[in-house]
Image: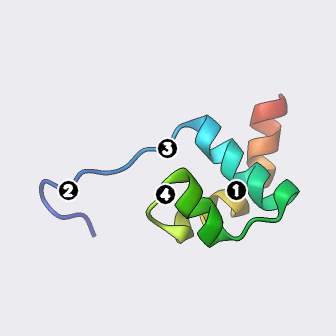
Amino acid sequence: MAIKGQKFKYYTESSKEEAIRLHLEEGWSYRQITEYLGIHDQGRVKLWMRQYPEWICIIRG
């Protein structure tokens, strides 16, 4: 639940694409990805991975 005055972190499309690429092509763990890209929540990367099929349709048209 959001706290009053809380600031949310937004990630660019390129950051999301890079996280997915690192996991699929390079075999990096979620922890390695979050540390490398400065993402504070491993669950965020897992969510992006679940949404991956939708991303491919959007990215590749």
* Mark sitting earlier along the chain (4/3): 3
Judged left or right of residue 52, residue 5 is: left
What residue is pinned by disc 2? 6
Where residue 51 is drawn, which disc sits there? 1
Q: Amino acid at mark 3?
A: Tyr
Q: Are marks 2 and 1 in contact (CB under 8 Å)?
A: no
* Mark sitting earlier along the chain (2/3): 2
Indicate the colouring scheme.
rainbow
Front position in the image: 30 or 3: 30
- Residue 57 is situated, as x and y percent measured from the top left of the image, at 82, 39
* Mark sitting earlier along the chain (1/3): 3
Q: At x 49% / y 57%, what residue is drawn?
A: 39
| Mark in the foreground, 4 or 2 | 4
Q: Amino acid at mark 2?
A: Gln
Name the outermost residue toward the top.
61
State the SS at label 3.
loop
What residue is pinned by disc 3? 11
Q: Amino acid at mark 4?
A: Ile
Front position in the image: 23 or 53: 23
- Residue 42 is situated, as x and y percent measured from the top left of the image, at 54, 69
Q: Amino acid at mark 1?
A: Gln
- Residue 45 is situated, as x and y percent measured from the top left of the image, at 61, 62
What residue is pinned by disc 4? 39
State the SS at label 2.
loop
- Residue at mark 4 to residue at mark 2: CA–CA distance: 17 Å
Q: At x 73% / y 53%, what residue is drawn?
A: 20
- Residue at mark 2 to residue at mark 3: CA–CA distance: 16 Å
Where residue 7 is drawn, which disc sits there? none
Label 2 CA crowd tier, 10 Å (few <14, some 14–19, many 20+): few
Q: What is the quadrant of the C terminus in the image?
A: top right
